[in-house]
Amino acid sequence: MTSHANLQISKKGLTKAGVVVLQTFFIGLFSIIEVVFRHGIGAFTGVMICVAVFGTIRFGRSGTEYVSAATAPLAFAVVTFIATILVDGFHVSKIGVDFASSLASAAPYLLVAAAYGWFSYFRSKR
């Protein structure tokens, strides 16, 4: 039987799975809050997307830069799609328009976060 007192973490920081969970949680939380109170995606969610990417790059282990750069747009798209369905119901045309407008309103923030994430990834590879 092993003792829990002897277990040590080899490195400090977020793992790849931790980066995915943390980004999805923060982006989901703030986008759902903004959809409920503002009925759309805006600057508040965009800033939180940037903060999530910057934070996971800063607090992630070495080798997690790729995951930090790639997860934010995917997590935002999935969360926005689910939130759109929950708010609008199953009306195909309304879901399509609201989903596209949500992606368009967060596009500048997604571009800034993705550019920094990929810059950090390629910088770490050199």
Image (tube, rainbow, N blue to C red):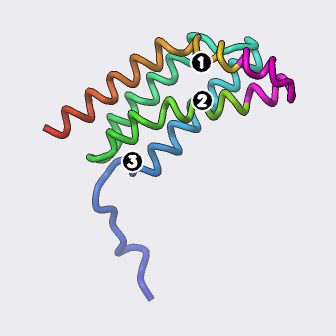
Category of crowding for the residue at label 3, using alpha-carbon neighbours closer than 10 angstroms: few (below 14), some (14–19), many (at least 20): some
Q: Amino acid at mark 1?
A: Leu
Q: Is residue 58 left or right of residue 70?
A: left
Q: Secondary structure at mark 2?
A: helix
Q: Secondary structure at mark 1?
A: helix
Residue located beneath label 3 in the image = 14
- Say whether marks 2 and 1 touch (CB < 8 Å): yes
What is the magenta range?
A: 83-98
Q: Amino acid at mark 3?
A: Leu
Residue located beneath label 2 in the image = 77
Of the two numbered discs 2 and 1 on the same chain, state the one appearing first in sequence: 2
Q: Is residue 121 above or below residue 36?
A: below
Residue at 56% over, 38% down: 24
Residue at 36% over, 71% down: 7
Report the magenta stretch's main SS: helix
- Say whether marks 3 and 1 touch (CB < 8 Å): no
Of the two numbered discs 3 and 1 on the same chain, state the one appearing first in sequence: 3
* Quadrant holding the N terminus: bottom left
Q: Secondary structure at mark 3?
A: loop
Q: Where does the image place residue 22, in percent across and percent down from the top left?
A: 51, 41
Q: Is residue 57 above or below residue 8?
A: above
Residue located beneath label 1 in the image = 103
Residue at 26% over, 46% down: 62
Q: Where does the image place residue 57, in percent across and percent down from the top left?
A: 34, 35
Q: Is residue 93 magenta?
A: yes
Of 94 and 52, nearer the camera is 94
Q: Is residue 18 magenta?
A: no
Residue 40 occupies quadrant: top right
